[in-house]
Amino acid sequence: MNGSCQYAEDLLLQPIWDKLHSHQDMLASPFFPVLFSFSANLLACAPYLLLDTMGPRWPFFHRYKLKPSHSIRPDTVLRSLSKIYYNHALFIFPVTLLCRGLRLERQMLQAPSISQLLTDVIVCLLLFDLLFFLWHLLHHQAPLLYRWLHSLHHQHASTYSLSAQYASAWEILSLQLLAVSIPHLLSCHPLSEMTFFLLNVWLSVEDHCGYDLPWSAHNIIPLGILGGAPFHDLHHQKHRCNYAPYFTHLDKLFGTYRKPARGNSVAA
Ligand SMILES: [Zn+2]
Ligand SMILES: [Zn+2]
């Protein structure tokens, strides 16, 4: 890359970072992390909830539903929403308060370059995927851990977008702590940290959305690198396979990979 291209790449994210930096008071508020997490999750779920509401009335989208005959009942949505609210208010809020207290605010004026941001986000996603894989495997191998801490998330055998956050307080807290501590330990730029956090939320909602849409990340990124909704839906049905949240390489490496076929029957 020549000098002028490098310079342009370095400056591309600067206006976005300057804008965010100008709202420093809001970012420093103790309420920001919990509101950011709560709203990012609901916003990511909103398009899929709309598709669920419209159902067969929108045949263009409905044909991509993994289980076309499965409809979401309003009381299931209400129960999921109250669980997400409860976990955020009673557990995530106190922990993020503590983390912010321990963490020195970084007075960074320079935005990262695009290549730096991409590297940070990919490394964070790969590391999160590995640690989640180990966490998930352990919580399925140990019957008591499964029963007490992870089985709640498996109450939704047929997932929909809000299932991503429908889990025990321990599960939400430990995975949230992983997501927060990885970029912090790697000393990522706050903009990389926010991008990783948003991507993490989006991919997790895509995993549970119940739709195999052509523009989903796992269909855009080639070679089956990402598993997406069909891969994770199979985990909710069969339990003993597809433990990784996003990438497929760890399950392939450990022999726990099962390939979902169209319509979600297992391919031979
Ligand atoms: Zn799940
Ligand atoms: Zn599981």
Image (spheres, rainbow, N blue to C red):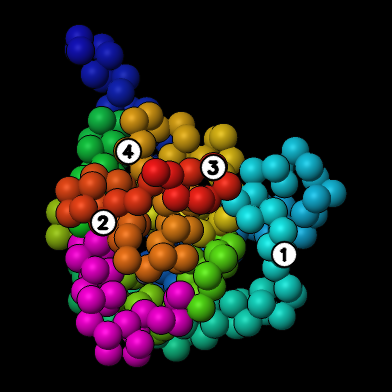
**Alpha carbon separation for disc pair 1 and 4:** 30 Å
Q: Position of residue 200 (x, y in %)?
A: 39, 55
- Using residue 20 as the reference point, say whether residue 120 is left or right of it: left
Mark number, residue 71: 1
x and y, in percent, of residue 264 in the image: 52, 50
Mark 3: amino acid: Arg
Write down the residue under mark 3: 262
Between the C-alphas of marks 3 and 4, the distance is 17 Å
Q: Secondary structure at mark 1?
A: loop
Q: Which residue is mark 4?
A: 225
Residue type beneath disc 4: Ile
- Tell me the element at label 3: helix
Q: Are marks 3 and 4 in contact (CB under 8 Å)?
A: no
> Which one is in front in this view, the residue at disc 2 or the one at disc 1?
2
Observer able to see residue 238: yes
Q: Which residue: 17% across, 54% down?
A: 254
Label 3 environment density (alpha carbons within 10 Å; few <14, some 14–19, many ≥20): few
Determine the secondary structure under disc 2.
loop
Mark nearer the N terminus (2 vs 3): 2
- Residue labelled 2 has its Cβ within 8 Å of some atom of ligand 2: no
Between discs 2 and 1, the one toward the N terminus: 1
Tag 1: amino acid: Ser
User: Residue 232, located in which quarter of the rendered image?
Assistant: bottom left
What's drawn in magenta, residue-wise?
131-154
The image's mark for residue 256 is: 2
Q: Secondary structure at mark 4?
A: loop
**Residue 98: image location, x then y, percent:** 28, 81
Q: Give the quarter of the figure containing the C terminus.
A: top left
